[in-house]
């Protein structure tokens, strides 16, 4: 089961259609991480890419964590699949041990990223809404394609 973590709690009921935020995956595994509020992403054996599907609602956000090594490159592409608002969804990439500071800020740099990783560890991809969609509790459905080489 895939859990969505926001506002200090997991929303696993959404996967069953109960109306809470959710995320899903194609091409790998996504499971809650015991060490933090981020959902851990692992690639399927023999692959280096995964597609994550889901929705973000209003002030909610969603964190994915994935392990990468110094010298690798992370590719991230975020696409809106549907919305009842303006579709203003973004992502940031946070380095290992970040306290919120990002090495890539999607609201400034766009929804496709090529990030050269300067150290090994757990990186976080944080999805969030901005503007009217965030403030009025709109829902934005999205696909997030991630690969590391």
Image (cartoon, helix red, strand yellow):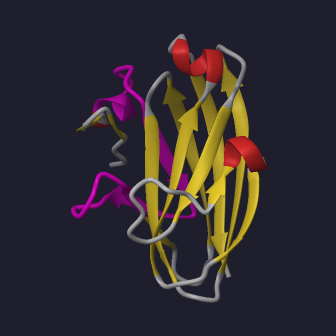
Q: Quadrant of residue 73?
A: bottom right
Residue 72 x %, y %: 64, 84
Q: Is residue 74 above or below residue 136?
A: below
Span highlighted in magenta in the image = 13-40
| Residue in the image at 59% along x and 52% along y | 92
| Residue in the image at 49% along x and 21% along y | 58
Residue 122 x %, y %: 43, 72
| Residue in the image at 74% along x and 45% along y | 108
109 or 45, which lies in front?
109
Judge whether residue 21 is colored magenta. Answer: yes
Residue 24 x %, y %: 49, 46
Q: Is residue 6 above or below residue 86?
A: below
* Relative side of 14 to 133, left or right: left
Judge whether residue 25 is colored magenta. Answer: yes
73 or 119, which lies in front?
119
Quarter holding the C terminus is bottom right
* Relative side of 18 to 71, left or right: left
Q: Quadrant of residue 7?
A: top left
Residue 77 x %, y %: 72, 54
* Relative side of 85 to 26, left or right: right
């Amino acid at each position: 089961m895939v859990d969505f973590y926001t506002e200090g709690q997991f929303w696993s009921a959404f996967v069953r259609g109960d109306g809470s935020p959710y995320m899903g995956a194609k091409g790998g595994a996504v499971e809650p991480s015991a060490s933090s509020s981020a959902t851990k992403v692992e690639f399927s054996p023999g692959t280096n890419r995964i597609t994550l599907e889901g929705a973000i609602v209003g002030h909610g956000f969603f964190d994915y964590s994935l392990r990468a090594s110094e010298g690798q490159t992370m590719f991230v592409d975020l696409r809106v699949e549907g919305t009842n608002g303006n579709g203003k969804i973004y992502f940031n990439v946070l380095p290992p041990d970040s306290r919120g500071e990002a090495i890539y800020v999607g609201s400034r740099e766009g929804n496709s990223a090529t990030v050269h990783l300067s150290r090994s560890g757990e990186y976080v991809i944080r999805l969030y809404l901005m503007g009217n969609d965030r403030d009025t509790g709109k829902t934005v459905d999205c696909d997030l394609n991630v690969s590391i080489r």
